[in-house]
Image (cartoon, rainbow, N blue to C red):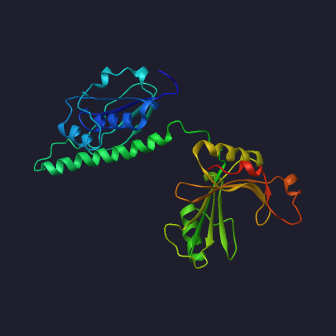
């Protein structure tokens, strides 16, 4: 099997519902990016409602058959995903990556459950599996990233003192420094730099997050992150540049899929600090034609 095409095995007990749906969904969503199988420790037959709810979303599984885990060649498997929630999941031997997605068994025989309720349970399992596999699909063939050395986050708060007390309790220690405008928590063991910023009367809702950031090694790493961002179709908010006001940094600002600001930054060396311009205007680190990643 090609090393670039992982083999994925979905496991449950009967191989009649969850793992069969997962197999079909993964084949549909992943295509040729993975080789997909399913099996069970006590295989039975494909449940009729499995066929029905998959047909609702345009996927025909009627030709699939329940299989025993003992029939699976370990050489064809790189990732095992177990789906059992109430039951004991089957074992699969071998040096493979393992994930556990507990999904309630829709085929479980529960007295008094109407057909409509049974169909709803199968749909719920199907939709939960589809959402998980969509995330798995997004992670396959992930391009190289910028190699972070620290996580930075800033959050707006209404009452700086109350928030400092809460986060000092949460993070296990007081902030490294604070002013009337902000407080900075630095936790090397967490590789985290966390800042509380006064809200200035801004409405606080789902955009309470001010920004996230990661530190990288140096100026070259910031410029390289700009190039690597092309591999994940990231959008540039501000191109790589050196800023001198406030905390001097080499920085790149991206937008995530929901328009949250993401900063990739590196602190300046003493030699770089000595080159600070008199006007303190930012210095671009890439040519203008290389700035847009749209």
Give coordinates of residue 247: x percent, y percent.
76, 63
Residue 1 to residue 60: above or below: above
Residue depicted at 53% across the width and 36% down the height: 141
Q: Looking at this view, is 163 or 204 the one in front?
A: 204
Residue depicted at 75% across the width and 52% down the height: 288
Give coordinates of residue 274: x percent, y percent.
89, 57
Q: Is residue 126 left or right of residue 134?
A: left
Q: Is residue 203 left or right of residue 101?
A: right
Give coordinates of residue 21: x percent, y percent.
30, 37
Give coordinates of residue 249: x percent, y percent.
76, 57
Q: Looking at this view, is 170 or 219 the one in front?
A: 219
Q: Is residue 10 left or right of residue 275?
A: left
Residue depicted at 70% across the width and 51% down the height: 291
Residue 62 to residue 169: above or below: above
Q: Is residue 15 left or right of residue 278?
A: left
Identity of the residue furthest to the left in this view:
112
Residue depicted at 22% across the width and 44% down the height: 106
Give the image quarter of residue 71. top left
């Amino acid at each position: 099997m090609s090393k670039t095409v992982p083999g994925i095995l979905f496991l449950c007990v009967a191989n009649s519902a969850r793992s069969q749906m997962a197999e079909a969904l993964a084949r549909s969503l992943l295509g040729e990016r993975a080789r997909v199988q399913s099996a069970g420790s006590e295989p039975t037959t494909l449940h009729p409602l499995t066929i029905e709810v998959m047909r609702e979303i345009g996927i025909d599984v009627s030709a699939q058959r329940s299989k025993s885990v003992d029939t699976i060649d370990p050489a064809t498997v790189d990732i095992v995903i177990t789906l059992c929630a109430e039951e004991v999941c089957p074992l699969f031997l071998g040096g493979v990556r393992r994930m556990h997605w507990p999904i309630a068994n829709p085929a479980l025989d529960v007295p008094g459950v109407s057909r409509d309720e049974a169909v709803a349970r199968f749909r719920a399992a199907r939709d939960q599996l589809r959402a998980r596999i969509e995330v798995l699909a997004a992670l396959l063939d992930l391009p190289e990233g910028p190699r972070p050395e620290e996580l930075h986050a800033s959050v707006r708060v209404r009452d700086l003192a109350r928030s400092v007390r809460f986060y000092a309790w949460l993070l296990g220690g007081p902030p490294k420094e604070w002013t009337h405008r902000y407080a900075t928590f630095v936790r090397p063991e967490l590789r985290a730099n966390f800042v509380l910023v006064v809200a200035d009367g801004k409405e606080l809702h789902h955009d309470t997050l001010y920004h996230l950031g990661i530190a990288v090694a140096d100026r070259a790493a910031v410029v390289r992150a700009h190039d690597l961002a092309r591999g994940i179709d990231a959008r540039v908010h501000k191109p790589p540049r050196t800023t001198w006001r406030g905390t001097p940094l080499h920085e790149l600002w991206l937008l995530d899929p929901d328009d949250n600001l993401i900063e990739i930054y590196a602190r300046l060396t003493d030699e770089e600090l000595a080159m600070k311009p008199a006007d303190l205007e930012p210095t671009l680190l890439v040519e203008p034609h290389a700035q847009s990643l749209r």
